[in-house]
Image (cartoon, coloured by chain):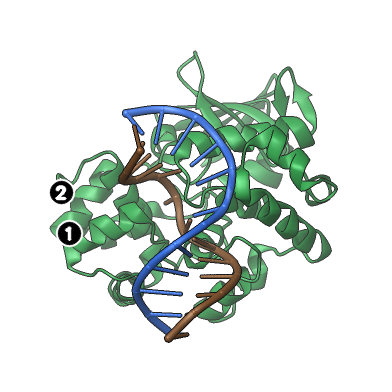
Chain colours: A green, B brown, C blue
Amino acid sequence: MYCEEKQNECKIYGIKDFSLKHIFECGQCFRWKPNTSGGYSGVAGGRYAEVYYEDNVLTIKGANIKDVNDFWFNYFDLARDYKSIKEELSGMDEFMEKAVKHGNGIRILNQEPFETLISFIVSANNNIPRISGIIEKLCSRYGNKIEDNVFTFPSPKELSNTEVCDVSECSKAGYRCGYIIDSAKMFSNKPFTPDDFKNCDVNEARKIMQTYKGVGPKVADCVLLFSGSRQDVFPVDVWVKRVMNKLYGVSSHKEINEFAMSYFGNLSGFAQQYLFYAIRENYLEI
DNA sequence: ACCCAGGATCTAC
DNA sequence: GTAGATCATGGG
């Protein structure tokens, strides 16, 4: 794998197990949209970019080598060996084999902790199109303009210095607005990084994450997983509950989590994402 | 009018 | 610790 820069774009060669559609449409992020050139456009890490993938080459327009080294390489989780992860999960049973086959280009993004936290607070009891809409409204109201009609995700301070009624009026996030502001203030006072959760017990990590307002068991697992903090978690939403019930006969939230941890182990997070993407696209025929 | 969406919180037992 | 009501909002 090597990177080449020219005219404000970078090409990264030799990337396999990679699909922009799988990555951006498997429900882990909310700010990437298909563009008219066959790629995706979005904002992450305070950077606007257009990305394309073809013949094992990832092209990032709007980035230089430094951006790739400082941010994009880690964001796309390019150091991880997904081939061996997929092989191990595929070998477990026929359902996982199908799910992995369908989402073969999925990568778990290493997203910014604060953005992940707020985004998944918004996600509670909500649907994906509406979550994206609310997040875009928060960005255009409180973030910084970096292109025409393109805004960064607001910083913890920018989202702290707000009023519930203003957040509600601009974003239509409803009863979640109080949670958003409260968690923004808490993060602003004491931010977390993925490293903070690397070496503790997984249930301790979950417990700490749930001290944020609006963060329960499911959102906690999402924030840990999608911010690159932990991979041995298993977010259980209505879709995952459905698929786990059908495939493995486990029903309660606790039962599902215990089964997932013992069955998928350290690959729980990856397994969950393959399953979620497959069931969402009605690929498992259940 | 009713149900649902990548659920969490609060209350009551 | 666990079941039930409640929480805005918009689409089907």
Q: Chain of mark 1?
A: A
Q: Taking A36 as reference, is A189 above or below it?
A: below
- In this view, the residue in front, C4 or A129, is C4
Q: Chain of mark 2?
A: A
Left-right relation of A285 to A78: left
Left-right relation of A184 to A19: right
Q: Quadrant of residue A214?
A: bottom right
Q: Earlier in the sequence, mark 1 or mark 2?
A: 1
The residue pinned by badge 2 equals: A286
Q: Quadrant of residue A16?
A: top left
- In this view, the residue in front, A37 or A64, is A37
Q: Taking A85 as reference, is A281 above or below it?
A: above
The residue pinned by badge 1 equals: A246
Q: CA distance from mark 1 to mark 2?
A: 7 Å
The residue that appears at 56% across and 58% down in the rendered structure is A223
Q: Position of residue A88 (x, y in %)?
A: 27, 62
Q: Position of residue A20 (x, y in %)?
A: 44, 34
